[in-house]
Every structure is written in C-alpha cells, then in structure tokens.
Amino acid sequence: MDLSVDVQLDLHRRMVRIRLFEEAAGRLAESNRLPGFLHLYVGEEAVAAGVCGALNDDDHITSTHRGHGHLVAKGGDFNRMMAELMGKATGYCKGKGGSMHISDTSLGMLGANGIVGAGSPIAVGAAFANRYRGRGQVAVAFFGDGSTNIGAFHEAANMACALHLPIVFACENNEYGEFTPRDKTMAITDIVDRAAGYGMPGVIVDGMDVIAVHEAAVEAVERARSGGGPSLIEAKTYRFYNHHGVQNLGLKYRSDDEVAMWKQRDPIFTLEDRMIENKAATRDQFDAIWAELRADIDTAIAFADESPYPTPDQIMVGVYTSMTGAQ
Amino acid sequence: MTTVGIIVNPNAGKDIRRLVTPATHTSDVTKVGIVRRAIVAAAESGATRILLMPDRHRLAERAADGLDLSGLDSSGARRDCVIEIVDEPLTGSRFDTIAAARRFWKEQVGAVIALGGDGTARDVALGWPDAPLIAISTGTNNVYPSAIDGTSAGAAAALVASGHVDIARVGRRSKRVTVRIDDVVLDGDEERHVSRDDLALVDLAFIDAQFVGARAVRDPSTVRAVVAAVATPASTGLSSIAGRVHPIDRWEDGGVLVRLGGGDGRRVRVPLAPGSFTTLDVAEVRPLALGENVEIVGKCVLAFDGERDVPVSERGRVNVRVDKSGPLLIDVEATLNIAARDRRFDAPSHSNTDGDHHGH
C-alpha cells in the first residue's frame, strides 16, 4: 500500500488543524481566557490523524482527558470547539462540558473523558452496539499508557476479546502519566505486551510518523470491520507541552534535552519534508494550508468571544440523556 | 578474561506484521528469560565477564537482576563472573544495537549473542562486521538467526570466547549484501550529493514506495526487485521470493537477483510474511557470482532484511553485490558437541553444590 497524495495531504491537514487549535487554546489559557484545565495534544498529532484518517465518518471513537486532538481529527468544528472551551452556549456541550467532556456524536466522537481509563469501556459498548446493529461500524478507544494500569482498561480489553468485537485499542504511549515516568508505575515497557494476555494482536508503531500510524490503523480497522476482532496499536509518542497547560506548574520532571530530542521529530514537519522530497507537495502549498487554517482559528476565537454564556434557566438542559438520541 | 557480549533488541517481534499475519509476538518477558538463561550458561561454561547492551526497556538489567554468578567451575576451581551493562548513550532505536556491537568489538569480546530478527543481526554487522556471532531468533522474519535456547547459546558463546573450542572449527564466515547508495537530496533549497555504504545479511529489496512508514513490506505489488544472499524456500519474507525460484543456501557461494513484474509469465506463490501467501509475477531470475555488481537506479525505498529503511530519489543509484564478508556465525550444536567430546562438561568427582548456577 502506498498512500496517494490526497491521503497524505488529508493526514497533513488533520495534523495542522490539531496543532493550530491546540496552540491557540494554549495561548488563550495562558492569558486566562479559558476556564478549567487544558491538556494539550501538541506533539501527538500523528496518532489521532493517522487513526481517524482510517475511519469512516460514522465510526466511533472514545477519547481521553487530552481529547481535543481526537475530535479535531474526526472532523470537529473549530467554532463549536473553541466556544465549548470558553464555556459558551454555542459550544459542543452548550458550554457545560469544557475541555474534558467535549464530544460530537454526529461525528461518532463519544466524548473526551476526565476519568483516566474510562473511555475504553464506552468504546467496547459502542463496538457491541455496532455489531448488534450490523452496520459495519468500528469503534476506536484512544487511551494513554498510564490508563492501562486502571481496571477499566483490563475489563474493556477482556470483554472486547471475549465477544470478538469490532474495536481498535489505540494507545498513545507518551511515557508519562501526568508527571510520573512510565517505568515508575509498571514493570513492562511496551503496552503491547499486554495485548497477548487478552488474546488479541498488538503492534508498535512510531507515533511521530503519521504514515506509520495510518498504515497500522488501516489494517486494524479493516480487521475489525471484516470480523477479525479487536487489536491494539501502541503508538510511541510524546507531548511537547506539559501535562496540562503550556507551562504547567513549572515542574521539572522531564529534561530539556529529552523534550528537545522529541521536538526534533515533529510529526508535521517530518511529513512536510518527506512530501517535498517526494515532489508530492511544495513549501508554498504547505504555507497556504497553514495560512488557511490559521484564518479558521481566528474565526473560531472571534465566534467564541462573541457567543453568549449559557443562561441559568438552561442549567438542566442537555445534562441527562433521554436515551432516545443515540447515534 | 573470557568475555561474552549479549545484545537484545527490545523492539524485535512487535511490528505491524502481527496485524496482517499470524506472526509471533515476542514479549519483553520472553526476551528477558532468554538473556537470563544465556548469562547463567555462559558463566557456567567459563565466561568471566558478560557485557550486556543497555536498552530503554531495561531488559538487560532485568535479566541480570539478582544473579549471583560466583562459584566453582566444572573443574572445582573458584571463579567469578561479572556482569556489566555497557555505558552507551541510548536512542531507543536500532542505533543502540549498532553502538553496542561496536563497543563489544572495542572490548575484544570473544563471542556475541544477539536476540532479534534479520534486522537485528544486520545492525550487529553494521557495528562489528566480523563479529563472532550467535543469532537467536526473536523477530518476525528469522532467516539469519536460528531458534536456539539461551542456555545452549550462552554455553557455546563462552566455550568459543574462552578458546576451549576453537572458533576456526565452529565459526563460518557468512555472506552479506553489500550496498552502495549514491543519491541527491534536498538540503533546504539546495541539492546535495550523498553517498552511503550499507549492508543486509539476507536480502535487499527495492520497493515502489515513498515512505518508510511502518517499515514492514506488506503490499506485494510494490516489490520491484530483490537481491538475496540467502534464499531458502523454507523461509518467510522477501528472501522467500528468491528462495522459491532459485534457492541459495546460507553457505553457497553467490546470490540471486529476482526482478518482479510482467516477464516470461512465470508466477510464484510466496509467504511474504509468516503465514501469509501471495502470488508474484517473476520478470527475471539472475544468479549472481560472489562480488558481481548489480546497479539499480531510480526512485524507491530500500528494504534491508525485510524492513523499509532508506528512501532513494529518482536520481539515486544503488550498487549491490553479494560477498562473503558477513559476521562469523558460530555453530552452537557443533560447539557443544566438541566440548562434550573434550569432556568440558564433566563435573569434579565429588560434586559441590556451591558451584551450581541457577537462573531463577
């Protein structure tokens, strides 16, 4: 399989959209224009873009506390996302969810999740429903390395394999659970070593290489869609910013050299350089894409700024489901 | 001093081929167990110093954890064996293997045990071209390495490193595919000519692709040509293409070039990955004498020993030859047979349990 230029440009666009959204959100948070916590996805773009680029619009994903990137990669609307982060009534959750509950069920994005590990069982539920309905949809659970120490992950993996469900477990192994290195919290290095214990194949890919992630995702999604059952992709990746925000609490739990080393492997610039070498795109073309998407971000910020906050009479609206509107 | 070096590739046996084929997953725990058995057996068989490659997974530390190798050798004499994890900067990539092999060369290691697939053995050869090597298969395509238990490998390595078994009797020079790449790359807006030398121990494949991506070659239609130093129909992977049309034994002089695509109409079924078969059209099969040069030009990605690695531009020229300059591959079974005949495994007449080495 060699990817067409259109697919390459699509993956690139998804990554640039994530990068620009997150950089803008970071700037707004640093200037106290966004309430609450903000976990930025900068550096990990190749994972969401590579996986979501392999999905159909009606496939489902569940996300994490670091969830903006997943929604952007699934096609999320900048205006509604930025409004949600600002707590405005025009946001995806009418301003009541914020960063860690952002979702768009019309895109199959079943929600970011403030509880570590909580997204995986939801994805298993979606996968079960998808098979029950027989529409050929696939579910993807995005989760971090740290969440595989949580019971919910193990229950989800076990049930998915026992029921042979159409699901892909997409692990974003960024080597840290909040501020704690992975090797302080688990005796294994590769999350993929856990896959065999449940009876599913697991593979490691370079999470800084969107092509590598996409190749693996295409295979895993096809396997799930064709009845082959669950699989686990472990993408080795890295977040360029801190656990939350840009500067976080100023804690030095990673060396400057380590951060700099990973930044040299920036997934977006790596793809751009390779595509230019391959004569699949030009620098001018990429500059135009960045400029176009920057304008979209500016529009989204203006939209969110100008949007109203939810009024007190809306406090109970959209909080509980009627159980009739599931996609 | 009798020194044995051990390299374990933490990344071997975990790539994308597990999604598309029934290829084996090799866990870290499995690798740690093999290394631990090799350490104990090497100490038991005369190693006084065991050097381990450091790795980001800390496999070496885990394998050595808690081992007490002090004790008596088979003659009843007191002998200690020290374990050292060599101090090399870690990259978390294949360059750790290359650096460790180079370091072992510098440290005059008597025998190297390497755990991985064909790619790992290639990296050892890049770091130490003449390495006296026991290659244990823990990878995906394992044409060069063999399924050997760590216990046997450790014992054989120590017997060779100590000189108790002469490497001239049990070591054979393996073949390799020697590669010279001349290309033009973009450096900013400037074009720059680059040349590099490289090698494969089993096969070099020319892939119609733009990216290295997930490294494994999964789409058979993208394989343009294969130059194989070892081509056996009993293997899986790219070398099996050549192996099924023109087998070349591991020790046979020469190699083979196979070009794929429309040709004389010959078609062949090959296991391009473990447990996964495909049909390929063969355009040309050309036996290669040792040292015979083949030049292939044009855009491709070069796959070394089964993994996409080096992109080549449309102006690139790749010169390839099969020669006999690979590592010195140690025959484990022959080594242990010689040692047994020489009564190297005999215990003192009054056994002393203080001399027992256990890996648990």
Image (cartoon, coloured by chain):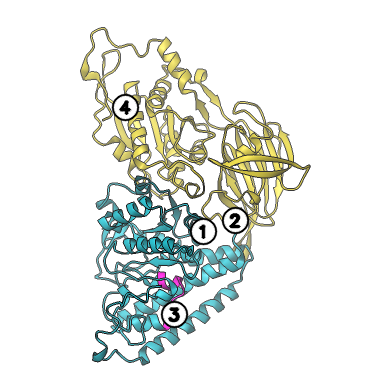
Chain colours: A cyan, B yellow
User: Which residue position holds label 2?
Assistant: A1
Using the image, tell me which numbered label, if any, was put on residue A218: 1
Gap between marks 3 and 4 measured at Cα: 60 Å
Distance between mark 4 and mark 1 Cα atoms: 44 Å
Chain letter, disc 1 residue: A
Above or below B170: residue B177? below
Name the residue: 40% across, 43% down. Answer: B10
Decide: marks 2, 1 in contact (CB < 8 A)?
yes
Instruction: Check disc 1: other Cα within 10 Å, few if <14, some if 14-19, many if 20+.
Output: some
**Magenta residues, start to end:** A70-79
Image vertical order of residue B257 relative to residue B183, above or below: above
**Number of numbered discs overlaid on the protein picture:** 4
Q: CA distance from mark 3 to mark 1?
A: 24 Å
Residue named by callout 3: A77
* Residue on which disc 4 sits: B40
Residue B188 appears in the rendering: no
Question: How far from the left and from the top, in percent, is residue B14?
Answer: 44, 46
> Alpha carbon of mark 2 to alpha carbon of mark 4: how far?
45 Å
Going 33% across and 66% down the picture, which residue do you hit? A64
Q: Give the distance between the C-alpha atoms of the residues marked 2 and 1, in whole angstroms.
A: 10 Å
On what subunit does the disc labeled 3 rest? A
